[in-house]
Amino acid sequence: MFHPLRVSAIERITDDAVAVTFAVPAELRETFRHTPGQHLNVRYSVDGKEIRRSYSICAPAAEQPAAPVVRVGIRGVEGGAFSTYALKELSVGDQVEAMPPMGRFVLKPRPGLFAAVVGGSGITPVLSMAATLLAQEEKARFCLIRSDRTAASTMFLDEVADLKDRYPDRFQLITALSREEQSAGLPSGRLDTERLTSLLPAVLPVADVDGWFLCGPLGLVRGTESALRALGVDRTRVHQEIFHVDDGPSDVTVVKVAAPSDSTLTATLHGRSGSWPVKETESLLETVLRSRSDAPYACKGGVCGTCRAFLVSGEVRMERNFALEPEETDAGFVLACQSHPLTPEVELDFDR
Ligand code: FES
């Protein structure tokens, strides 16, 4: 469900990125309280066309009873309708519609050692995680390994430097720039599997890390995953969120599957059920959207996870999946925007 929120501040944080803060009315404070790592799905109309995007919340999570701060990072994407709009035209006082914070790429404050490997705008949710963790849990430490093109393109430079100043013993920062040499830190170049496999054990006790958080372009996340696997890290300690699929290697098989000619989808959404014929080649999300405009989605590209639904019966084939963890697909969850029926009857439950 979408709620109207007003923009209360816009700060330019690099040449091509802004941080946008939304004012949360008193009656929506609990609704917009976030867990560090979650994102906001926004809906806006540009030139009469509805656009939806998801943006991670960079602000630390507020402890009760303080009001939540809803501040997101937005980086300009070439041809990106909302990001172009946000960078050039969005003004304080404008109204957008936003769903309550969501997402399962989260870190709730607890004692332990945590590490993140992030690239580009992948810092956004991790900034919220690190800032909240260090402020709320004295027995926690955080190691941030970040990769950016140049210092000028690095988002949230000041906020990260501030963490270093405030928590010199509990926050460790390693910076890699792919296109620029720096006076301190790592030599320039991309962080690939080989480099990470030797770098990680050199900067922190890999076996003692309680949780790994990988966020950014597909190539960096997959490369870090391989390095962690090579270093013997248990898969259950690794959490990931992919931001840019186009950037990554072509290790993704996109499977186009035509629906059996007479498939029927039954779906439960917000407590109400309906059944509809599935048109050939349309995704199950598109089938639901023809009759139910309240079906949840943002990216329609298999990346954000907003359209997650439980497959109650039947079989589906997903074209691609960058959002669900193996445990979720094993438990029966699918991405409706990527699913096509393989059986004449399919039932989805969006409420689980
Ligand atoms: S809408 Fe983003 S994964 Fe389906």
Image (cartoon, rainbow, N blue to C red):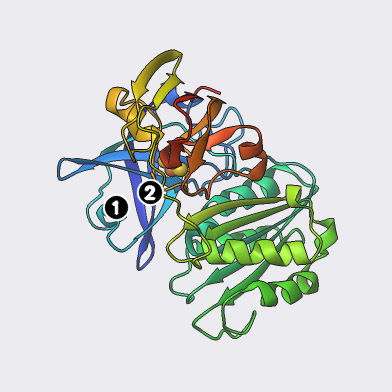
Residue at position x 62%, y 67% in the image: 223
Name the residue: 61% across, 74% down.
191
260 or 184: nearer the viewer: 260
Hey, which quadrant is residue 116 in on the image? Answer: bottom right
Residue occupying image coordinates x 44% and y 42% = 338
Horizontal placement of 184 versus 205: left or right? left
- Can you tell which quarter of the image residue 105 is in? top right
- From this view, report whether residue 311 is shown above or below residue 253: above
Q: Which residue is mark 1?
A: 86
Q: Is residue 109 above or below residue 167?
A: above
In the image, is residue 190 above or below residue 291? below
Question: Observer-nearest residue: 178 or 218?
Answer: 218
Residue identifier under label 2: 20
Question: Is 122 displayed left or right of 10 in the figure?
Answer: right
Secondary element under disc 1, as helix, strand or loop, is: helix
Q: Amino acid at mark 1?
A: Ala
Mark 2 residue type:
Val
Q: Position of residue 1 (x, y in %)?
A: 39, 25
Picture residue at 44% right of the left edge, 26% below the top = 344
Number of callouts in the render? 2
Closer to us: 8 or 28: 28
Toward the left, the furthest residue is: 47
The percent position of residue 17, horizontal first and vertical second, equals 38, 61
